[in-house]
Image (spheres, rainbow, N blue to C red):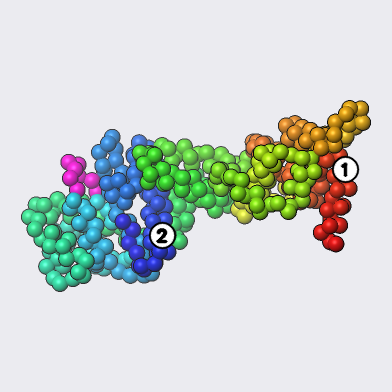
């Protein structure tokens, strides 16, 4: 489980966040060469990898907010060893402890690569286990001492210490390194935000067991999709927009001009709150693009001009027809709203075709944003003047 440099809830939350994001980085690193590898969270260990149902690597993730050193006497190490001594599997997976702290020279013997010395590490572990140490690890250290030489070697030979890994706050930089091959230069922040937004949902499903495992291929498909969304002729959908918003969001918009405009045409309750939802989604989406510099204000202004032009054609047509039929002004306004939403052909980018965004942007214009005013009721201009008078009175 994630280690904590503090007993605060914030420290624990950061630890679990780091564990989930570490899982993403680890799968990204493996998936490039092992597309069929399967990864799970909190199953056999904090993170585990398997191939064809057989575990190949188990990870213990230790996160600390502040600096520190992990040694042969550290609780983090003995807690991991205790978990691994509990394993009852026929395979011999790599047992890796990934920590944000540095190792001392003794524990560095269990890093991978040059300088690794399992036999010397076992001697030092025996020595540490036999000494007085932190009371928390007493039972675990005694348990290690009961193993015979062959059992100790079989255990420790599989242990790998990966130290000085990025803390929760530094994982974005690591994700950029892992997925550098796929990221268009200049779009690193947007790519990571989209990837993490998708991964948050995957992590929840792995933890609640609605998803058994995720493979390197699954991740590669998602990465390719994000890359495609970030091409010049397209735009990505902010993961926050994909939430299931409910009617509670309407409370924040009751006094907005676009909501008054909808009330003037007597829009029914169901369509009213869904119109508010469209506005909310479009606003959230625009904010995401502007934050990551995926669109500019001038591009949005040009799009607003095109929307206004389409609205104007429909509005003038419906108002002209009103003179020859018996529709009430409110019904005319509803027809204007329905037609312009249905017939709108404008696109912000050629391959970004999300109807909710156009609908939401039309409500933004009805709110007086982006320099172009639209309305639904045939007399909306007069009613807007009255609304402004009421506000300034």
The spot of residue 11 in percent (x, y) is 40, 64
* Magenta span contains residue 366: no
- Marks 2 and 1: CB-CB under 8 Å? no
Q: Is residue 324 left or right of residue 274?
A: right
Q: Quadrant of the C terminus?
A: bottom right
Q: What range is drawn magenta here? A: 87-94
Circle 1: element type: loop
The residue carrying mark 1 is: 379
Reply yes or no: does residue 89 show up in magenta.
yes
Most frequent secondary structure within the magenta stretch: loop
Q: Which mark is residue 13?
A: 2
C-alpha separation, residue under disc 2 versus residue under disc 1: 54 Å
In the rendering, at what x and y percent does residue 59 appear?
29, 51
Taking depth in this image into account, of 363 and 128 the one nearest to the observer is 363
Q: Residues within 10 Å of mark 2 (few under 14, many from 20)?
A: some
Q: Position of residue 249 (x, y in %)?
A: 62, 49
Q: Is residue 323 left or right of residue 65?
A: right
Given the current orientation, which residue lies at the most extreme bottom position? 132
């Amino acid at each position: 489980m994630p280690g904590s440099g503090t007993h605060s809830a914030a420290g624990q939350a950061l630890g679990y966040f780091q564990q989930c994001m570490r899982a993403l980085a680890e799968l990204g690193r493996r998936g490039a060469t092992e597309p069929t590898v399967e990864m799970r969270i909190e199953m056999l260990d904090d993170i585990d990898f398997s191939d064809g149902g057989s575990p190949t690597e188990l990870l213990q993730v230790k996160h600390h907010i502040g600096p520190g050193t992990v040694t042969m006497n550290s609780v983090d190490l003995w807690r991991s060893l205790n978990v691994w001594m509990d394993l009852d599997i026929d395979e011999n997976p790599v047992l890796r402890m990934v920590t944000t702290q540095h190792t001392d020279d003794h524990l560095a013997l269990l890093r991978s690569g040059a300088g690794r010395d399992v036999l010397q590490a076992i001697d030092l572990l025996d020595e540490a286990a036999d000494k007085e140490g932190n009371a928390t690890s007493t039972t675990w250290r005694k348990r290690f001492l009961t193993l015979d030489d062959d059992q100790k070697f079989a255990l420790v030979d599989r242990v790998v210490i990966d130290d000085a890994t990025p803390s929760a706050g530094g994982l974005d930089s690591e994700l950029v390194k892992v997925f550098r091959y796929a990221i268009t230069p200049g779009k690193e922040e947007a790519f990571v935000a989209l990837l993490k937004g998708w991964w948050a949902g995957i992590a929840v499903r792995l933890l609640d067991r609605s998803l058994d495992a995720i493979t390197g291929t699954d991740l590669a498909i998602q990465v390719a999709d994000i890359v495609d969304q970030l091409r010049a002729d397209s735009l990505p959908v902010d993961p926050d927009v994909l939430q299931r918003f409910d009617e509670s969001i309407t409370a924040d918009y009751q006094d907005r001009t676009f909501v008054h405009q909808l009330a003037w045409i007597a829009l029914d309750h169901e369509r009213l709150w869904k119109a508010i939802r469209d506005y909310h989604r479009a606003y959230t989406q625009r904010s995401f693009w502007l934050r990551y510099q995926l669109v500019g204000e001038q591009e949005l202004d040009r799009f607003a001009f095109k929307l206004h032009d389409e609205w104007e054609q429909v509005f003038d047509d419906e108002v002209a027809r009103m003179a020859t039929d018996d529709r009430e002004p409110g019904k005319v306004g509803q027809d204007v709203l329905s037609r312009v939403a249905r017939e709108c052909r404008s696109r912000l980018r050629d391959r970004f075709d999300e109807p909710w965004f156009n609908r939401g942007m039309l409500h933004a214009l009805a709110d007086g944003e982006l320099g172009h005013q639209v309305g639904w009721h045939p007399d909306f201009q007069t009613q807007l003047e009255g609304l402004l008078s009421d506000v300034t009175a």
